[in-house]
Image: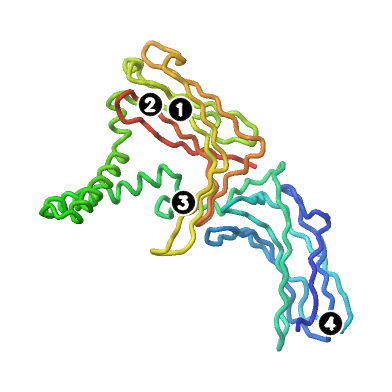
Amino acid sequence: MSKCNVKILFDRPDGTYKFGEAITGVMQVAAHADFHCRQMTLIREWKTHGRGNIASGGEEGMILADAAEFKAGETREYPFRFAGLAGPVSYQGYHLSVEWHLRAHLDIPLAVDVKHEEKFILVGGETSQEILLGTGEDVKIDSKISSELEGRIAMAKVLGVPFFIIGLAMIYLSGWYPLTLALGLAATGFGGWQIFLMLRNKLARQKLGEIEVRLHPDKLRPGDHLECSVDLPSSHAERLQKITATLIGEERVVSGAGNHKMVHTHKIHEQVIEQTAYQAIDDVSKLQFSLLLELPSGAPSTFRAPDNALFWFIRVQCDIRGWPDWVQEFPITVMP
């Protein structure tokens, strides 16, 4: 049986703090029996929860007491104060949640240590500190936390040519045996499709020329507008049917490790804007498109940590008549 009950009581009843505001309160210890506590610590940190592997950060600890003696029925309170934070903000999503908490630990010799956690909520606000959007680590494609399009292109580079060659070899060696022929055709088709994905933009540039995309601004806050400008040579205008800009917010997490990794995605927002070639500004040498997108007022901020991410990006697609489309994604940062 536990020697005591522990409660963490915040000075604010709702436990909500803005950037820069100190996290204060008391830790209450109610003893059920006499016991000696070697050390009493309180740790502040955030953790991810959901379908992905757990990531954590922002850890800071303090010692509230050393070598404390408790008598049965006694209740003591220990005040605490942690410096104000600058992110990441608390978030409750579909596959991903980011939660801040305080964790108490009472080290009791010859008995079970007492542990207790209490959540608090961190929201955005004015701060002079640099705002944190996670652990600050870059998330690479090989960590499987890339956008959907980047992931497909990365897979195409790895699988396209090998599957295509293996498929052709199986067809050649099949002797028209139905099962081997079917597997060969499937492998060739899969490999050919991956090669197409890898080369699609190069093929598109042959018809449209060099395409320039500009985003202003590339850092936004909820409710802000974003202008997506697309320029391409006017000499190729007759081949262009339309330009599409899609604003996408997406959770992307990884569970498991090694060969047992699984990627889970959930789209939290999508806005599509289209313009035809007739809506472009013809500046003699180039066509200029301007597409205006709006971030929703409740948009969650960008978050990046190992195996856990919340991405915002713009997907630009040039629809070319009778030819592979040009598609590319451009990341943006949403601040709290």
Q: Nearer the viewer, mark 4 or mark 2?
A: 2
Q: What residue is shown at x 40% (from left), y 44% (from top)? A: 150
Q: Is residue 250 above or below residue 41?
A: above
Three-letter code for the amino acid on which mark 1 is drawn? Thr
Contact between marks 1 and 3 (CB within 8 A): the answer is: no
Q: The residue tagged with tag 3: helix, strand or loop? A: loop
Check disc 1 and report the residue beneath it.
244
Q: Is residue 49 shown above or below 322? A: below
Give the labeled residue for mark 2.
319
Q: Is residue 144 left or right of residue 85?
A: left
Label located before the other in sequence (4 or 3): 4
> Going from the N terminus, do you reach mark 1 or mark 4 first?
4
| Residue 237: x %, y % from top left | 35, 17
Q: Amino acid at mark 3?
A: Ile
Judge depth for marks 1 and 4 and give the one in front. 1
For label 4, the residue is 32
Q: Nearer the viewer, residue 168 or 112?
A: 168
Graded by Cα atoms within 10 Å as few (under 14), some (14 to 19) or many (20 or more), the crowding at tag 2 reads some
Q: For the residues labelled 4 and 2, say whether their Cβ atoms are less than 8 Å apart.
A: no
N-terminal-most mark, 1 or 3: 3
Mark 3 — residue?
145
Q: Are marks 2 and 1 in contact (CB under 8 Å)?
A: yes
The percent position of residue 233, horizontal first and vertical second, equals 35, 19
Foreground residue, 223 or 246? 246
Q: CA distance from mark 1 to mark 3?
A: 24 Å
Tag 4: amino acid: His
